[in-house]
Amino acid sequence: MASGLKAGVRSDWQGAILVCRKCSKKLDGGFGRKGKQSLAKGLRKRLGLKKGRKAAIGIVEVGCLDVCPDGAVTVVDTRDPGRWRIVPAGSNLDDVAAELGLAAGAVQPA
């Protein structure tokens, strides 16, 4: 009898950063040098991560997390799921990465 599951797909992720898509959309950017980049895209670029499952850590925009802070984005680190973070618009991406335990060049594939 078949279990319904297909063969798995390899990923280099050590964890994932979940970024609320609704919060990001309400801000219409808010991050990066000119303040026009989404938090997810800004973090990926700042950390120099590869795309998709080849990255050392996944940064994924997900549906609404139902926190809805004013002028900020809700973020969940799957390596620490009991602590959700609120990232105000305009926050320094290096500081955000450090708070999440990520640093440019320090995130290496497993």
Image: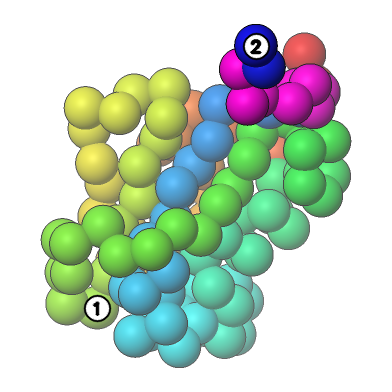
Q: Residues within 10 Å of mark 2 (few under 14, many from 20)?
A: few
Task: Answer above or below: position of 45 versus 51.
Answer: below
Residue type for callout 1: Gly
Membership of 6 in magenta stretch: yes
Distance from disc 2 to disc 1, alpha carbons, whole Å, reads 52 Å
Specify the quadrant that holds the N terminus: top right
Q: Name which residue lies at 30% across and 28% down.
A: 81
Q: Is residue 6 left or right of residue 103?
A: right
Would you say residue 14 is visible in this rendering?
no
Residue type for callout 2: Met
Q: Which secondary structure, mark 1?
A: loop
Membership of 85 in magenta stretch: no
Q: Is residue 9 left or right of residue 82?
A: right
Where residue 71 is drawn, which disc sits there? 1
Q: Residues within 10 Å of mark 1 (few under 14, many from 20)?
A: some
Q: Name which residue lies at 77% across and 47% down.
A: 52
Measuring from the top left, give residue 32's x and y in whole percent: 59, 72
Q: Name which residue lies at 56% across and 52% down.
A: 60
Q: Is residue 106 left or right of residue 64?
A: right
Q: Which residue is mark 2?
A: 1
Measuring from the top left, give residue 6's x and y in whole percent: 74, 26
Q: Which secondary structure, mark 2?
A: loop
Prevailing secondary structure of the magenta residues: loop
Would you say residue 101 is visible in this rendering?
yes
Q: Which residues are magenta?
A: 3-10
Looking at this view, name the residue that lies furthest to the front.
1
